[in-house]
Every structure is written in structure tokens, then in C-alpha cells.
Image (cartoon, rainbow, N blue to C red):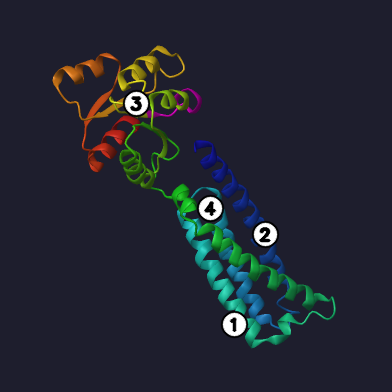
Amino acid sequence: MIGTMRKRSLSIAVISYTLALLYAVSFVYYLSSVATSVVYHYAIAVSLMCLVLFFGAVGLSFGKSWGRTILIFGNIAFFAVGIWMITLFPEVIELQSFDQNTFFNSLFLGTICLAAVICAYLAQHKVKLLLNPDMKYMRKSVLVIDDDEGILTTMKKILLPVGYSVLTASSGERGLQIAQTQKPDLIVLDVILPGLKGREVCRRLKDDAATKDIPVIFLTAKDSPDDIKAEMDLGAIAHVTKPLHARLMVAKVKEILG
């Protein structure tokens, strides 16, 4: 999941640079077309909109959420104005001969289609998450090892919205495999697991040079002083008692990873 998020961030960066270049070129072209275009007043409006969208693309390239907002609403306005102009000026879509106005019209139609595509992409929730300025813990991952599907689902629901990647495993053996290959930033571990028990999982994690530095939180119904001491002696960093309390868990994760 971490790799996927990095790929998405790279895709957004490439898209933003491309859009910035496109809007800069479009701004210059539309502005130069004012004197010759049959719809010169539209050329002025579009050139100004391209300038605004250029700044939105620049903001997006720096990972700013306001850049995404400008691009979404700017392209919605661009699309709406474009459709209105086609209705008001039918000659905009007449492409019988290739001259300056025809090229202007072709660019105009292409820009309208591009506006719809840009809005559809940037409106996705996963893009919003990547650009949310409140996501201070973005790209840090939490591996949850628990045989209770309800716990796995709940952990995803409470950690994903605050910017963490969430990996899950329903057995100790599978959890060890994921920890060794994915190297999560934090592991939340149940004690009672099918097969390999939670404390043995923790012991093996701490004995492995590749995973020994990953902090471990035990999430379990076993909460006697002896149980908690045994967990701490194995190298765990914290103990959280079931039933799962969402706010407490999020606070504990932020405390450790922050």
C-alpha cells in the first residue's frame, strides 16, 4: 500500500507539471488569438481562466490542497462556460477548413474535454487524502495482526481517514511475513492468535534484525499486571485493552509515530 501511495504521489506530480505547461501554452495562445478570433471576448476570458488554472497546477505540484481546489472548480467553470459558448456561438464547432480560427476552435473543444477528465481525476477521495494538509502522518503504515475480522475492519476505518496505510493479517505467521517484507512503521498485535501466538510473534520480531526496531502495541483483552509486564519484557512499547476504543487507539498511534 505504501508503494501504491508513492506511485499516486508521483502521478499527481507528473500530471501537475504537465498541466502547468499546458495552461501556460494555452494562456499565451488564447491571448494572442484575441485580435483574430471570431469570438475574441471568449478568448480574453479563456486566457484569464488558463492563467488561474496555471497557478492551480503549480500549487498542485507542491502538494497543496488549494491547488487541487482551484483546478477542480476552475475546470468545472471552464467546462460550463465552454458548453455555453458552443450553444451561443455555433461557429465554434465548425471545422470545415484548417485556418487560425479552426485551430482555435479545435483547441477549445479539446480543452473542454480535458477539463472534464481533470475534474473526474482530482475529485477522487484517494487524491484528496494525498493532498490533505492535516495528514501529518501520511505514508506511515500500521500492521494489524488479529484473528478478529471486526478488529481489522475497525482499525482500517479509524486509521485510514487520518492518513495512515493499514496492513492486516489474521494469523501470527502471516503477520511475520508481512512485517519482514513490508517493514511497517508500527505493529498492533493481539495475544490470542490461531497457530503462532502473539507473544511469540513479538519475540521473533525483536530477534530479527530487520524488524527489531518496529514498535509493537499489544491490543488484547488480557490486562492483568503480569500480562502487561510479560508484553513489555518482550519489547512491546504499549498495551491497549480490548474492547477497542477508537479515539484512544488513534491517540496512541499518533503518540508513537508522531
Question: Could you say whether the residue bearing mark 3 is in a helix, strand or loop?
Answer: loop
Which of these two is toward me, 252 or 37? 252
Query: In the rendered structure, which amino acid carries the disc numbered 1?
Result: Trp
Closer to the eye: label 2 or 3: 3
Residue 56 in percent (x, y) is at 54, 59
- First reached walking from the N terminus: tag 2 or tag 1: 2
Proximity of marks 2 and 3: CB atoms separated by less than 8 Å: no
Number of the label disc, if any, that sits on residue 22: 2
Residue at the left extreme of this rendering: 225
CA separation in Å, label 1 and label 3:
64 Å
Question: Could you say whether the residue bearing mark 2 is in a helix, strand or loop?
Answer: helix
The stretch of residues the image draws in magenta is: 179-186
Closer to the eye: label 1 or 4: 1
- First reached walking from the N terminus: tag 2 or tag 4: 2
Number of the label disc, if any, that sits on residue 194: 3
User: Is the residue marked by circle 2 packed among few (<14), some (14-19), or many (20+) residues within 10 Å?
Assistant: some
Residue 240 in percent (x, y) is at 23, 30
The image quadrant where one finds the C terminus is: top left
Query: In the rendered structure, which amino acid carries the disc numbered 3?
Result: Pro
Write the residue at 47% across / 24% down: 177
Write the residue at 68% across / 65% down: 26
Residue receiving disc 4? 60
Closer to the eye: label 1 or 3: 3
User: Is the residue marked by circle 1 packed among few (<14), some (14-19), or many (20+) residues within 10 Å?
Assistant: few
In the displayed structure, does residue 128 sit left or right of residue 30?
left
Question: Could you say whether the residue bearing mark 1 is in a helix, strand or loop?
Answer: helix
